[in-house]
């Protein structure tokens, strides 16, 4: 039921962080993975590493905020690996500053990438799935900050709340085409981008508010992601799966 061997899966934001981890994991499970991001050199290095380890990977340069580029990238991806069966809609950015100090440029960057970008990729992928008669799966990467909030990340939290609601709206409309749309909502995970923060006093205080009293490890996202991408989750659509060590149920 958890088989994805031979499936063509597109991962946006695939050159680093969650996206890079997802690409490696899915390739190890036998999927043909297309990594999409803006940084061509980083993509090429990651594709080379996956292929050298026995996986099957390619890359497309993609700016998720521009509809024409999204459509072109998805068409290019299918030229080599065939119809896209699933998408991990992962590209995202943040801007950390109190709301009173957030400027318009930061707002536009976060909303365009995290919300508009997820919309454009999901829409373009679904159009190709319908045209190719593929019963596909789209997994939008949201966040627990789309369900509850934290200080100094208002645009990010707002964008992720939009992703949660978008997931439900698209699931409702696209079920008739056999396309499932679900969302993965990670809590706080250890990555190379946040090591310094979590070694400081504020980071340590945040970890104490997680019921499991620790950060998540990237491999703890693998099972939930595989559930949503594979036939094991065939009766799941419009779901939002939190992977957060119980952070959402912590006391206020």
Image (cartoon, grey):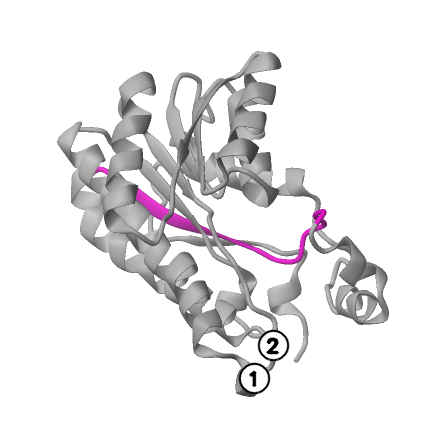
Quadrant of residue 196 within the rendered picture? bottom right
Q: Is residue 185 magenta?
A: yes
Nearest the camera: 244 or 12? Answer: 12
Q: Position of residue 40 (x, y in %)?
A: 48, 34
Quadrant of residue 1 within the rendered picture? top left
Residue 128 seen:
yes
Which residue corresponds to the image point at 43% horizontal and 32% vertical from the top-left? 232
Location of mark 1 (residue): 101
Q: Position of residue 7 (x, y in %)?
A: 38, 22
Q: Secondary structure at mark 1?
A: helix
Give yes or no for contact between labels 1 and 2 (Cβ–Cβ under 8 Å): yes
Q: Is residue 98 above or below residue 92?
A: below
The circle drawn on residue 123 is none
Residue most extreme to the bottom: 100
Q: Position of residue 105 (x, y in %)?
A: 44, 72
Which residue corresponds to the image point at 36% horizontal and 49% vertical from the top-left? 64
Location of mark 2 (residue): 97
The magenta span reads 178-192
Q: Secondary structure at mark 2?
A: loop
Mark pair 1, 2: CA separation: 6 Å
* Circle 2 crowding by C-alpha within 10 Å: few under 14, some 14–19, many from 20: some
């Amino acid at each position: 039921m958890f088989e994805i061997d031979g499936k063509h899966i597109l991962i946006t934001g695939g050159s680093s962080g969650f996206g890079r981890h997802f690409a490696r994991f899915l390739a190890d499970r036998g999927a043909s993975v297309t990594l999409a991001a803006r940084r061509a050199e980083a993509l090429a290095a990651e594709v080379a590493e996956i292929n050298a380890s026995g996986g099957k990977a390619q890359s497309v340069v993609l700016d998720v905020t521009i509809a024409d580029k999204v459509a072109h990238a998805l068409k290019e991806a299918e030229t080599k690996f065939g119809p896209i069966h699933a998408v991990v809609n992962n590209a995202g950015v943040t801007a950390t500053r109190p709301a009173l100090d957030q400027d318009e440029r930061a707002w536009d960057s976060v909303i365009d990438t995290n919300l508009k970008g997820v919309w454009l990729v999901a829409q373009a992928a679904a159009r190709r799935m319908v045209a190719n008669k593929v019963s596909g799966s789209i997994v939008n990467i949201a966040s627990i900050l789309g369900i509850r909030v934290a200080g100094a990340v208002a645009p990010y939290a707002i964008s992720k709340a939009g992703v949660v609601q978008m997931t439900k709206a698209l699931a409702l409309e696209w079920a008739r085409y056999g396309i499932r749309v679900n969302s993965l909502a990670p809590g706080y995970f250890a990555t190379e981008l946040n090591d310094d923060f979590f070694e400081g006093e504020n980071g340590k205080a945040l970890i104490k508010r997680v019921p499991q009293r620790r950060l998540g490890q990237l491999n703890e996202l693998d099972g939930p992601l595989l559930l949503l991408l594979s036939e094991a989750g065939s009766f799941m659509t419009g779901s939002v799966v939190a992977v957060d060590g119980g952070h959402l149920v912590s006391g206020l």
